[in-house]
Amino acid sequence: MNAPLDPDAAETLAAKRYYILGAVRVGSIAAVILGIAIARALIEAPYALGVVLAVAGMLAFFFGPPLLAKNWKAKDREQGQP
């Protein structure tokens, strides 16, 4: 087992994870908007690409952050951190 993180390192890690979760959400919304724009022919690209982007963006928005958090919690438990 590793020693627990000092408060500054734990705070830095928490801030890093917070920003990653935000970036996943913003990126997912961007993918949904781009997918809709492609599907509505506002941007020239194959229709199927637009649908795939929109669906993948929605899935990433709803399931990405919880999966990341679950993974991080499991790793923290393995390392003996609270």
Image (cartoon, rainbow, N blue to C red):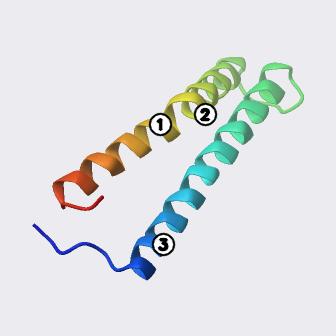
Q: Residue at x 56, y 50 (%)?
A: 21
Q: Are the residues at dot 1 and dot 3 in contact (C-beta closer than 8 Å)?
A: no
CA gap between label 1 and label 3 equals 20 Å
Which labelled disc corresponds to residue 82? none
CA gap between label 1 and label 2 equals 9 Å
Identify which amino acid the numbered label 3 is placed on: Glu
Indicate the secondary structure of the residue bearing disc 2: helix
Q: Residue at x 27, y 56 (%)?
A: 76
Is 74 in front, or is 21?
A: 74
Which labelled disc corresponds to residue 11? 3
Q: Is 75 on the left or on the right of 69, as rendered?
A: left
Q: Mark 2 points at which residue?
A: 61
Identify which amino acid the numbered label 2 is placed on: Phe
Indicate the secondary structure of the residue bearing disc 1: helix
Q: Where is residue 32 in the image (x, y as percent from the top left)?
A: 72, 31
Indicate the secondary structure of the residue bearing disc 3: helix
Q: Mark 1 points at which residue?
A: 66
Q: Where is residue 82 in the image (x, y as percent from the top left)?
A: 30, 58
Q: Is residue 35 above or below residue 28?
A: above
Q: Which callout, 1 or 3, points at the residue further toward the start of the chain?
A: 3
